[in-house]
Amino acid sequence: MKVQLEKILFQGSINFFVRESSQFQPYWHYHPEIEITLITKGKGFRFVGDSIHPYAENDLVIIGENTPHQWVSSTTDETNLQRAYVIQFKKELFQSFRECYPLETLLEESQRGIQFLGSKSTIIPVILSFQNANGIQRVSLLFELLNELLEYKEKLVLSSTKYKYPLNVRDERFVKINNYILNHLDQKLTVEHVAEKCNMVPQSFCRWFRKCSGHSFISFVNIMRVEMACQSLINSNLSIKHIALNSGFENVSHFNRTFKSLKRRTPTEFRKSR
């Protein structure tokens, strides 16, 4: 993976595709198009700006122009593909319609990413309809979809208020380091070791990593390890100690302390609540 600017080729004003794979690999990227993504199969972790959240079926987000993002699967299953419905379009599409001015608030907020919660019963069918639509039908569906998103009440803005657009997403080294960390969470990861991977001294690496990700190196690793542990707590009967060690923590006490700091409850309490 050598580039982060994703160049999207449009056959019309709207780009629609269904992405299917046994695993969504790390791909930290951005593009000038606004993107709406609906996950219909699979689970893993969604990164938008400086936010890191788990995703599962019916996860729906809108991501603004040039906002870095990626989806990373937590499992690989050749018999059960991950599936995402993706709609991409440019903001300029609406500039000649005064009736679309109310959309400006939604599109502005999308710079930080917005997740739509709840059942989304009026939204999901519209997105699925894109698959069998062409040309002007897709334009009509996009207007209908954005109107539904605008009026929908159960929303969560993803990136924090301290997130400053744009981050330094053009640095190819971050793609390499991001992928390395996500593929080695269950192993020992030190600042010195990872800094060496991109030929930087630890102090410079820490400043650079925070600028790229919005998190300190330690915070980023801890968040990902805790999220990985949450999946095991929900989907397995493994002991807390086993999960802690499998998630890359050196001991249970460190795991419990970090988990409670991030989730406001202990691993045992989290498991019982699910």
Image: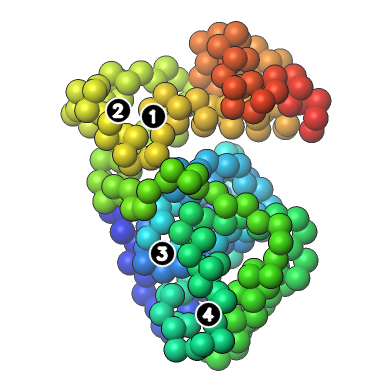
Residue 198 vs residue 150, the one in the foreground? 150
Q: Which residue is mark 2?
A: 206
Query: Where does residue 229 sit, x and y in percent of width and height?
Result: 62, 26
Q: Is residue 157 above or below residue 51?
A: below
* Helix, strand or loop at mark 4: loop
For residue 238, side relative to residue 168 (left or right): right
Q: Say whether marks 3 and 1 touch (CB < 8 Å).
A: no
Q: Given the image, on which type of amino acid does mark 3 rest? A: Glu
For residue 19, side relative to residue 153 (left or right): left
* Helix, strand or loop at mark 3: loop
At horizontal 70% and vertical 19% (from top left) the residue drawn is 266
Of badges 4 and 1, nearer the viewer stands 4
Q: CA distance from mark 3 to mark 4?
A: 17 Å
Q: Say whether marks 3 and 2 touch (CB < 8 Å).
A: no
The C terminus: image quadrant: top right
Q: CA distance from mark 4 to mark 2?
A: 42 Å
Q: CA distance from mark 3 to mark 2?
A: 27 Å
Residue 216, numbered label: 1
Label whose residue precedes the other's in the sequence (1 or 2): 2
- Residue 257 quadrant: top right
At horizontal 48% and vertical 82% (from top left) the residue drawn is 94
* Helix, strand or loop at mark 1: loop
Query: Where does residue 26 sit, x and y in percent of width and height?
Result: 43, 45
Label whose residue precedes the other's in the sequence (3 or 1): 3
Q: Which residue is mark 3?
A: 65
Residue 101, numbered label: 4
Of badges 3 and 4, nearer the viewer stands 4
Q: Given the image, on which type of amino acid does mark 1 rest? A: Ser
